[in-house]
Image (cartoon, coloured by chain):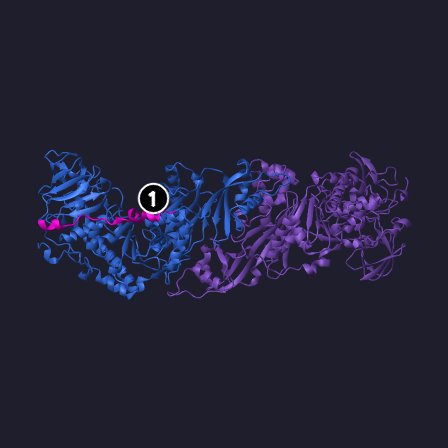
Chain colours: A blue, B purple
């Protein structure tokens, strides 16, 4: 760990030899012009070494390229005049990420494996003429004398097909898989195999998002994640969003097409997971899925037309387990799919899985859980009660409907700082590659930066005639050029438009109105919130100050924020590992009170009030100190 | 009802205008030569009308053809000299059939319908925005408030696919099908349909024999049999008996072939049953099957190779219900197949179904149940205990291994009487058609008749030089010509050979040794038997006296005998109608003590002793009065 002091501000921060100095500066609140995202292309991020030793690229005209230089000792760095900010801007606090939920609470959330399908080794007595009961009865007798005493055992008829050979090849010592039924006294015998080592008891957990599908292969004995893989949801070809896909599902065999597509995609992910973990599909005991209500319906081949129309009824919200092969999976016959229960048409199994995944239902603290997907679902509550709502925020914070928006993958600009006088950007991309677009956290920091520097006014309009050519009027209206064409990976300027800003204000307005309406509905206010947990795919960077500055997150003490990543997948994995978690999900889905905001007049009022940066009511954002009066007048 | 007196014997018997006079004479114990079986071809069955009125065919040379003549009033008939018997033979008692079990006890066996799948009409409250739970939850809520209170309800995932449309098309008033699970507190929701009249709750019951498959379509509400249809088991192409089929099943995809064939046949029978009853497959709620252990394994696609080899283990003896569609049936997805439980490799679900079908397990009388199929399975017991065994009798009494043996269908000679001096036969065929062969009851009466007239000795050898050319030596040894070529439907002499006799003696010996061994094993004797119930396909005629005469049935009072027909199908139908019957079958299968006769030295002793007509120990057959001394000496 080395200490780095940036001059002339004198700001000091710690770094390691793994973090390039551009990132270090970002964390320290130091602005350094940087266009290419850290790809070592634009050469704008020049710094000078005053003291200490570093490795990296010296530039021909003197200085070092910050984005490719790393500390080898304590350093004193001078930021050149072209990057330097005025005094005022130096008050900018350290860029602050929400604490990792996993790092803060992960330990207490470690799940003791106790999956709904358990494997047991059983040794049967050899048959003889004086003990000549059938193979199945022999197995059942042994089970009834052992751990299954007093239980009713149902039998999957499929197991009979291979039972005699398995028993004999295994010399009457076999591993049986028993699945819990709905009734606590009933178990279901779903598989009999030759005794193998315990590493063959695996599960696949899926999060099926409208856009992305993520899977993890989990060892049900050791709790270890053996492999992870994501792919785009192929249903995208039939509609970007759930509404257009439901429209498609209504016609002809549209539903079947959508189901077939997603099953094929999941099958492909399973193959890839097995390849990566060097294991066989045969080792998979079960599959869990967390998805929104529409995606769950599509996966199970269920009609969605009544989900769309008043009063918005799902076919089911608690789904019986279903054989994978029945849905068309290329998986062994014993494998069942367990889908996380949903709450209502717009609050799905992904939210339920998320809430249970982070353990909200076990904690006394009043928590606001925010999943910034397409709909912006939110849950408010604690171990005793929960209320939920979908804010219809749209996909802007996932990059949807944003001109150069993209998902948080390599090449996405994940954070931007704007120079308060020159309006030059300091942009960092995921993976330090040339920029391809801007992901959620980047979009938030752009909006916040442009607002704080006064480039955008409260209404979200660009100020004209500022001393920069990055703000310009194009065919589609006013925009800010984040990266010029030559420093991108896409051979065109990456811009951020007034239309993007409008979309974002609507989206953050819907979210904020959602928080307030939900709190109000239960007689509470923002200051009562003890924790806010952010779920979603934001990349590693979401600057809390910036998110609060634009009014996307409420202005409460920063240590109450936690970032939890893909909580839907987290919950799906937890469900695979533990039947108690599955049960908790059912309970949580049933205990959640769903508020339909679209029917709520208070929501509309709050929404309209939230259509400013950060909000019409400045008292809601006491720590957002940028005032009109502070702003440069053009 | 008319009275008929046959002269010169003076024997009098009642008849109806539906029964031809040849049959009437047979019942009266009057011999009339008749070769063609009653087809009106041979013209040998001439009688003279002394008094009264009849309709029929007058012959050109005087007299009437008995086989095509019917009483229209009381009659006095004279049997011509060529048919007349000597005095001694007139002692022959009336041909006596075993009493019909159904007629004797059918009333008390009428089953109160209470099938394992019940249908209930449920009216759901219309959904609204204030009551917007999912379709499935709405249904489950209503069930939980109604008759299913306190029960656990499992849900077939398939029903979800059509649930939303069904509920709405039915205007929220639906019929649900609930199936009992193994655990008494659990029900399974297997179907939801629009409310229809109760006649749509049907079942198909099957008896799958090695040779023949019989099906009945049953109304589960009214108990009515709507249609009945039989077909040959198409697996015959792969082997006549179970052993050769098991051999075939071992190779390549032999098992799959056998399964596919039988399923296709059952599908065809279902189609025919529905056609005959003018109903749709859609109305079928469940299918029950009773079959021997091997046939059950083939149907379910289960390995039979371990059934063949020591210690003869079935894969299972209690079979979990299995979805018809999973076995390849062209039946709706909700339909399950319930197979009757088996006892052991050679005592199958057909026997268990038979025993339960006749209610043996509910009666205090010591009963011997005899199913004369391929194996000759027997059950001894009453409501308190049961012992069973397979006698390995072979298929002789079903016509198997008999030169002109055939099943009891149209054209089969079902009863024969032999003239004690001329050795001319009086043969009746099923349906009064030209003879094609000889079925079980015909075979027994031939053997008995030839033995009683002295044409066969105790060892089953033909006496030579008797005054008839019907007994002759042919290429294959000595034989008796039952019907000459010109009066048959097969353009060849129908004969009964010494090899046939040998087979029959072995078969009846195995059966008899089985009865005695089983009785001995439980410390009892033949005279303790209170009832003997005969199951099997014998046609309408099995003459008890004849069957006892050859030592096939034990010599106990005739009123203790009952004929019950296809008891396997009877049991399968009872199981379809009532879950209590299904439960009884499980109990019965488990309570039956199975004796493996092939390992029993006493059985071998009894078998050897039984290889005479009727038996080496004449004291076992006190009422069989034909003694060597009475016989004509050639």
Chain to which mark 1 belongs? A
Q: x%, y% of residue B255?
A: 57, 40
Q: Which residue is mark 1?
A: A231
Q: Is A92 in the magenta?
A: yes
Identify the magenta region: A87-111
Point 22% across, 51% down: residue:
A544
Q: x%, y% of residue A576?
A: 40, 47
Q: Residue A419 or A195: which is nearer the viewer?
A: A195
Please indicate, yes or no, whether residue A35 appears anywhere in the rendered image: no
Helix, strand or loop for disc 1: strand
Relative to A270, A181 lies left or right: right
Q: Residue B25 or B550: which is nearer the viewer?
A: B550
Placement of A432 over or under A257, stated as above or below = above
Q: x%, y% of residue B287?
A: 58, 52
Say which quadrant the C terminus of chain B sits in: top right
Q: Is B117 in the magenta?
A: no
Relative to B332, B603 lies left or right: right
Please indicate, yes or no, whether residue B168 appears anywhere in the rendered image: yes
Q: x%, y% of residue B579?
A: 59, 56
How many neighbours does mark 1 have within 10 angstroms: few (below 14), some (14-19), or many (20 or more)?
A: some
Say which quadrant the N terminus of chain B sits in: bottom right
Placement of A599 over or under A352, stated as above or below = below
């Amino acid at each position: 760990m080395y200490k780095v002091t940036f001059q002339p501000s004198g700001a000091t921060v710690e770094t390691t030899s793994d973090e390039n100095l551009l990132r270090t500066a970002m964390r320290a609140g130091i602005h350094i012009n940087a266009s290419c995202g850290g790809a070592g292309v634009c050469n704008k991020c020049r710094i000078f070494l005053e003291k200490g030793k570093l490795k990296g690229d010296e530039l021909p005209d003197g200085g070092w390229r910050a984005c490719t230089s790393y500390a080898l000792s304590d350093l004193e760095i001078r930021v050149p005049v072209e990057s330097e900010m005025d005094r005022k801007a130096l008050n900018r606090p350290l860029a602050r990420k929400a604490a990792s939920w996993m790092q803060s609470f992960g330990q207490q959330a470690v799940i003791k494996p106790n999956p709904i399908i358990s494997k047991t080794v059983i040794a049967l007595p050899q048959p003889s003429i004086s003990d000549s009961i059938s193979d199945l009865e022999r197995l059942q007798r042994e089970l009834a004398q052992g751990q299954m005493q007093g239980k009713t055992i149902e039998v999957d008829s499929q197991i009979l097909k291979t039972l005699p050979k398995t028993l004999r090849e295994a010399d009457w010592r076999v591993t049986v898989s028993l699945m819990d039924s709905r009734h606590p006294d009933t178990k279901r015998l779903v598989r009999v195999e030759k005794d193998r080592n315990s590493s063959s008891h695996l599960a696949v957990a899926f999060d099926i998002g409208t856009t992305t599908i993520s899977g993890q292969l989990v060892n049900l004995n050791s709790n270890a994640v053996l492999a992870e893989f994501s792919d785009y949801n192929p249903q995208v070809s039939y509609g970007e969003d759930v509404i257009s896909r439901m429209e498609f599902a209504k016609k002809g065999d549209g539903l079947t097409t959508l189901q077939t597509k997603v099953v094929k995609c999941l099958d492909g992910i399973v193959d890839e997971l097995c390849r990566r973990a060097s294991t066989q599909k045969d080792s998979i005991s079960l599959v869990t899925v967390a998805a929104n209500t529409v995606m769950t319906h599509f996966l199970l081949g269920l009609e969605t037309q009544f989900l769309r129309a008043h009063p918005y009824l799902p076919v089911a919200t608690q789904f019986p387990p279903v054989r994978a092969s029945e849905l068309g999976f290329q998986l062994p016959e014993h494998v069942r799919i367990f889908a996380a229960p949903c709450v209502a048409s717009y609050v799905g199994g992904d939210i339920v899985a998320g809430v249970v995944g982070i353990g909200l239902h076990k904690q006394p603290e009043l928590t606001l859980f925010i999943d910034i997907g397409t709909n912006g679902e939110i849950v408010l509550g604690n171990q005793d009660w929960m209320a939920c709502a979908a804010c219809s925020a749209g996909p802007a914070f996932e990059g949807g409907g944003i001109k150069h928006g993209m998902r948080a993958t390599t090449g996405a600009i994940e954070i931007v700082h704007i120079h308060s006088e020159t309006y030059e950007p300091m942009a960092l991309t995921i993976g330090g590659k040339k920029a391809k677009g801007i992901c959620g956290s980047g979009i938030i920091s752009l909006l916040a930066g442009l607002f704080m520097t006064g480039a955008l006014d409260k209404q979200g309009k660009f100020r004209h005639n500022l001393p920069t050519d990055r703000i310009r009027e194009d065919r589609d209206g006013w925009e800010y050029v984040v990266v010029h064409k030559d420093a991108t990976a896409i051979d065109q300027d990456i811009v951020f438009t007034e239309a993007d800003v409008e979309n974002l204000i609507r989206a953050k307005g819907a979210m904020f109105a959602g928080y307030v309406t939900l709190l109000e509905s239960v007689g509470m206010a923002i200051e009562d919130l003890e924790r806010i947990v952010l779920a979603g795919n934001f990349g590693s960077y979401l600057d809390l100050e910036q998110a609060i500055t634009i009014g996307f997150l409420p202005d409460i003490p920063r240590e109450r924020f936690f970032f939890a990543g893909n909580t839907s997948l987290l919950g799906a994995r937890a469900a695979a590992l533990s039947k108690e978690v599955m049960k908790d999900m059912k309970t949580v889905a049933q205990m959640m009170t769903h508020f339909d905001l679209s029917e709520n007049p208070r929501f509309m009022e709050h929404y309209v009030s939230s259509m400013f940066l950060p909000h019409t009511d400045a008292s809601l954002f006491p720590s957002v100190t940028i005032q009109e009066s502070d702003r440069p007048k053009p």
